[in-house]
Amino acid sequence: MDIKNGAAHVEFRILDDGDIGIIEIGARMGGDFIGTDLTPISTGFDYIKMVIDVACGYKPSFDCKRNLSKAKVMVKFILNQEDIIEYERIKKEKPESIVRSGNFDLDFTNEVIDSSTRHGYYILKDI
């Protein structure tokens, strides 16, 4: 791939026989909130600024915006009615854990076939 500078998104799987299978390699940030939300929240680094700085030829800043206490963060996608019930439960019991949510389309007659047809998402922190 010869990626020398900038963001890289790599997905791999360790196979049953111990070999490593490459799923995807791209000279880009990870999608599905990886670069925009999950990485900054879990590490404290301004990842997008770092990517832009490198693209502009500047050295990235490794100033951390928070204590590295291993914040747990995840994105949950709304794929069916059960997922929205779980979201509503979390919103009621631990609303402070929801960082962001959106794109709610509660017409579950539409089948989810790819990332563009998901019924919504929410990002959870420290749950």
Image (cartoon, rainbow, N blue to C red):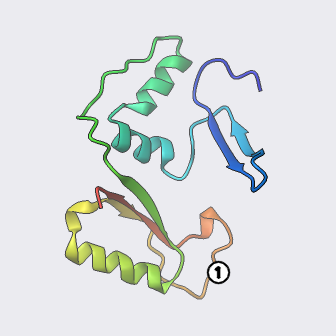
The percent coordinates of residue 14 (x first, y second) are 70, 49
Q: Position of residue 61 (x, y in %)?
A: 38, 18
How many tags in the picture?
Answer: 1
Q: On the picture, is 17 further left or further right than 39?
A: right
| Quarter of the image with the C terminus in it | bottom left
Residue drawn at (61%, 63%), measured in percent from left and top? 115
Asked if 79 appears above or below 31 in the picture, the reply is below
Quarter holding the N terminus is top right
For disc 1, the marked residue is 111
Q: Tell me the quarter of the picture where residue 68 sits.
A: top left
User: Is 103 placed above or below 69 here?
Assistant: below
Given the current orientation, which residue lies at the most extreme bottom position?
Answer: 109
Residue at x-position 69% and y-position 50%: 13
Q: Is residue 32 left or right of residue 100?
A: right
In the picture shown, does residue 43 fall above or below 103?
above
In the visual, does 15 lie left or right of 43?
Answer: right
* Amino acid marked by disc 1: Glu
At x 53% / y 53%, what residue is drawn?
A: 32
Assess disc 1: are there few (<14), some (14-19) or many (≥20) residues with their C-alpha within 10 Å of its C-alpha: few
What's the residue at 62%, 38% (across, down)? 9
Residue 70 rendering spot, x and y as whole percentages: 32, 43
**Element at label 1:** loop
Which sits in the foreground, 44 or 6? 44
Give the vertical position of 16 relative to 26 (above or below): below
Q: On the picture, is 28 further left or further right than 17? A: left
42 or 51: nearer the viewer: 42
| Residue closer to the observer: 53 or 94 | 94
